[in-house]
């Protein structure tokens, strides 16, 4: 059995790709100074202490790490432990 895409499915797929490209471009445009230096600094805004950005970065890392391993100990996060 052949997998043939209909023109309606193709148009819908192209529309989704166009919409994702638009949103990605707008996100880059809105955050350009930070987007250009994303590997060098963690944007903390006007706060002298980067507690919230650091917690958000740690949370993203923890979720990605647990996703790679199949969530074996997701609820045993060592964030507030020594």
Image (cartoon, grey):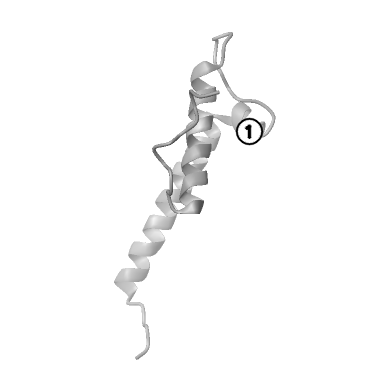
Q: Dot 1: within a 10 Å radius of its alpha carbon, few (fewer than 14), some, or many (20 or more) residues?
A: few
Query: Which residue is most to the bottom?
Result: 1
Taking depth in this image into account, of 53 and 34 the one nearest to the observer is: 53
Residue 64 horizontal side relative to residue 42, left or right = left
The residue at 37%/83% (across/down) is 3
The image quarter in which residue 11 lies: bottom left
Residue 13 in percent (x, y) is at 38, 63
Taking depth in this image into account, of 59 and 5 the one nearest to the observer is: 59
- Residue 10's place in the image compared with 49, above or below, is below
Residue 16 in percent (x, y) is at 38, 56
Element class at badge 1: loop
The residue at 36%/77% (across/down) is 5
Taking depth in this image into account, of 68 and 44 the one nearest to the observer is: 68
- Residue 46's place in the image compared with 79, above or below, is above
- Quadrant containing the N terminus in the rendered view: bottom left
Residue 38 horizontal side relative to residue 11, left or right = right
Residue 9 in percent (x, y) is at 32, 70
The image quarter in which residue 74 lies: top left
Q: Which residue is mark 1?
A: 38
Total marks shown come to 1
Residue 57 in percent (x, y) is at 53, 30
- Quadrant containing the C terminus in the rendered view: top right
Query: Which residue is most to the right?
Result: 40
Query: Which residue is most to the front?
Result: 82
The residue at 65%/33% (across/down) is 36
The residue at 57%/11% (across/down) is 49
């Amino acid at each position: 059995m052949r997998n043939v895409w209909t023109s309606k499915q193709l148009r819908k797929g192209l529309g989704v790709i166009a919409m994702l490209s638009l949103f990605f471009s707008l996100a880059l445009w809105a955050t350009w100074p930070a987007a250009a230096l994303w590997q060098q600094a963690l944007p903390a805004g006007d706060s002298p202490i980067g507690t919230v950005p650091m917690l958000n970065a740690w949370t993203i890392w923890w979720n990605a790490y647990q996703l790679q391993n199949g969530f074996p100990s997701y609820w045993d996060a060592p964030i507030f432990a020594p």
